[in-house]
Amino acid sequence: FGWFGFNGGSALGSKGLAIMAMMNSQLAGSVGMVGWMIMDILHGKKPGLVGACVGAVAGLATITPAAGFVDMNGAFLIGIMAAVLCYKCVHWIHNLGYDDALDVWGVHGMGGFSGSIIIGLLANPEINPGTATRSWEQLRVQTICSCVTAVYSYVVSYVMLKIMDCVIVIRPPRHHDAALDLVQHGEVAYVTHKSNEHLNPDGPYNASSDASSDDDSTEDPKRATNGETKHISQRIVRMA
């Protein structure tokens, strides 16, 4: 609903251009969602809800710059481009080992960047007369503006994050990665660890190794104090 608001609202009025922008947003988001699931299948994965949502966001982010300049055929092509390009960018940056929280660079960054450039190829002068028209000159202008914006955003974001990092720690310790929800919020939102691992504030520990240590500690029950017995019972309950 937010995308309908700022894409359609960019027309600054309830008129045909606003309706076209909303229709383009709906179509590109839908095609991006289906396209992302197809990409999952082609890469040997099982399509899921998270992937479908990311694909829809990729389509919406990519159509945003072009929503008021292309027709529905162009929006359909942009949805396909968003699914393929953003999917590849997300996997590429993950393979490089970068920490791209919520796939912001791969989906929003590259989606918006490519959507701005593609206006030069798909802009229909009948949609928004007197603005953008598909041509090589328009493609050149869109490419230059997109590159300048990307460099500006990178520099400003880098400076701001460095300043913030001097005040608060932006990147949590690596050993907390497997249990960030538990460490930061005291609860677990998604089960992403293995079934034989249990989460604690310092990261996951292996239940099998714990079981062997528990066996050693409970080999002679008479030697266990009341406190030790309580501690062992709690750990066995967690493993169960």
Image: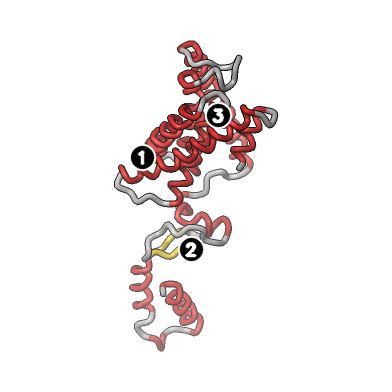
Q: In the visual, does 9 lie left or right of 202? A: right
Name the colour scheme.
Answer: secondary structure
Q: Secondary structure at mark 2?
A: strand
User: Are circles 1 and 3 on residues that touch, CB within 8 Å?
Assistant: no
Of labels 1 and 3, earlier in sequence is 3
Q: CA distance from mark 1 to mark 3?
A: 32 Å
Amino acid type of the residue that numbered disc 1 sits on in the rendered structure: Asn
Please identify the quarter of the rendering in which residue 187 is found. Answer: bottom right
Of the residues tagged 3 and 2, which is closer to the observer?
3
Of labels 1 and 2, earlier in sequence is 1
Question: Would you name the residue on which mark 3 appears?
Answer: 67
Question: Would you name the residue on which mark 1 appears?
Answer: 95
Question: Would you name the residue on which mark 2 appears?
Answer: 200
Q: Secondary structure at mark 1?
A: helix
Q: Is residue 200 above or below residue 31?
A: below
User: Are circles 1 and 2 on residues that touch, CB within 8 Å?
Assistant: no
The percent position of residue 47, horizontal first and vertical second, equals: 38, 49
Mark 2 closeness class: few <14, some 14–19, many ≥20 residues within 10 Å: some
Amino acid type of the residue that numbered disc 3 sits on in the rendered structure: Ala
Q: CA distance from mark 1 to mark 2?
A: 27 Å
Of the residues tagged 1 and 2, which is closer to the observer?
1
Q: Residue furthest bottom?
A: 222
Q: Is residue 100 visible?
A: no
Residue located at (40% from left, 38% from top): 87
Of the residues tagged 1 and 3, which is closer to the observer?
3
